[in-house]
Image (spheres, helix red, strand yellow):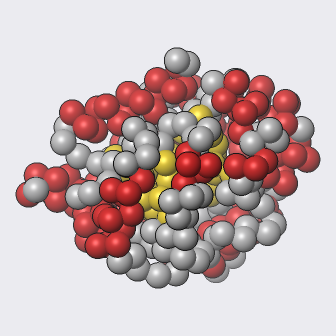
């Protein structure tokens, strides 16, 4: 087992030992500028995040809602791409050897960069895993299997429409954890049905020993706490991206409260999840 898998596995083991779900936070690389993006990334673990998802900006993010689309456009306008994103992770990793970092995005930028070059540079930067939402299991030879061979977890998404026949294919080469998409649609646009989410998590667990993490539509402390009761982890993304966006000035530039706006929300979410587990 590689160091990268160890970081992910160790995090879930620690959270289980503490009797709670992991808090997984998503922010967009380079939003609104590289230096602020790095400061946000560094602040997340201190505020209570257990695993970091770092968005790789792309011009056509088909699974993302308006908040994350806008964040990606801000990052792209500032010149953020694969090289700068990997550099931000490497700079973060220089000061944090333990927090898992998952790079989340789409295949086009990776393909344009070159798969072998990308994987080598991702490993060197200290990335632990990949979520590439537009590569189905039928395309595992493209990136999934080469990533696994390099020691990078390839994290697959299951959705409300992933039935019993499809689920084994989705899980076949998944590593690190399974990401359950709690709603049908794009990120940040609806509130999950918590009862249905719990049922779906239970169904997935019958097919895998991997942790099951739930995301999409989780916006508030109450949402996170409700899902944390039945899942191994909770992903919050659009709410954090929105918090950052609200802190920017009219020209989209970061202000003195930008990092704190994100960190304060993470702290609130983490407290809510811990309280929910204590109550349970």
Quarter of the image where the C terminus is located: bottom left
Q: Nearer the viewer, residue 262 or 138?
A: 138
Q: Residue at x 87, y 46 (%)?
A: 111
Q: Position of residue 65 (x, y in %)?
A: 61, 76
Q: Position of residue 223 (x, y in %)?
A: 31, 70
Residue at point 66% right, 29% down?
A: 148
**Residue furthest to the left:** 279
204 relative to 3, above or below: below
Q: Is 127 situated left or right of 16 in this image?
A: right
From the viewer's side, name the closer residue of 201 and 177.
201
Is residue 47 something one can see in this rendering? no
- The picture quadrant where one finds residue 193 is bottom left
Q: How many marks?
A: 0
Q: Which of these two is toward me, 188 or 169?
A: 169
Q: Is residue 105 left or right of residue 215?
A: right
Question: Residue 125's quadrant in the figure?
Answer: top right
List the single residue furthest toward the front. 165
Q: Position of residue 4 (x, y in %)?
A: 54, 26
> In the picture provided, is 199 more to the left or to the right than 188?
left
Q: Residue at x 91, y 47 (%)?
A: 112
Picture quadrant where residue 203 is located: bottom left
Residue 137 visible in the picture: yes
Query: In the rendering, at what x and y percent does residue 185 appear?
Result: 58, 77
Q: Does 112 sit above or below residue 279?
A: above
């Amino acid at each position: 087992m590689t160091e990268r898998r160890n970081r992910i596995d160790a995090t879930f083991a620690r959270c289980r030992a503490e009797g709670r779900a992991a808090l997984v936070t998503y922010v967009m690389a380079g939003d609104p500028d590289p230096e602020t993006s790095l400061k946000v990334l560094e602040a997340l673990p201190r505020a209570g995040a257990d695993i970091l998802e770092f968005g790789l900006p792309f011009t056509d993010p088909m699974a993302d809602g308006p908040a994350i689309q806008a964040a990606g456009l801000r990052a792209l306008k500032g010149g953020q791409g694969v090289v700068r994103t990997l550099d931000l992770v490497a700079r973060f990793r220089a000061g944090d050897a333990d927090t898992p970092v998952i790079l989340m995005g789409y295949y086009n930028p990776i393909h344009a960069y070159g798969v072998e070059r990308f994987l080598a540079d991702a490993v060197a930067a200290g990335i632990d895993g990949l979520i590439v939402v537009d590569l189905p299991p039928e395309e595992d030879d493209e990136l999934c299997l080469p990533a696994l061979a390099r020691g990078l977890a390839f994290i697959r998404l299951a959705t409300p429409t992933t039935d019993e026949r499809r689920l084994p294919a989705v899980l076949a080469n998944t590593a690190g954890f399974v990401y359950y998409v709690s709603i049908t649609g794009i990120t940040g646009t609806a509130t999950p049905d918590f009862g249905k989410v719990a049922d779906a998590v239970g169904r997935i667990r019958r097919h895998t020993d991997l942790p099951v993490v739930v995301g999409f539509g989780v916006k508030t402390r109450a949402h996170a706490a409700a899902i944390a009761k039945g899942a191994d982890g909770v992903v919050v993304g659009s709410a954090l991206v929105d918090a950052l966006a609200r802190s920017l000035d009219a020209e989209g530039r970061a202000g003195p409260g930008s990092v704190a706006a994100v960190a304060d929300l993470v702290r609130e979410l983490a407290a809510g999840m811990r309280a929910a587990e204590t109550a349970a």
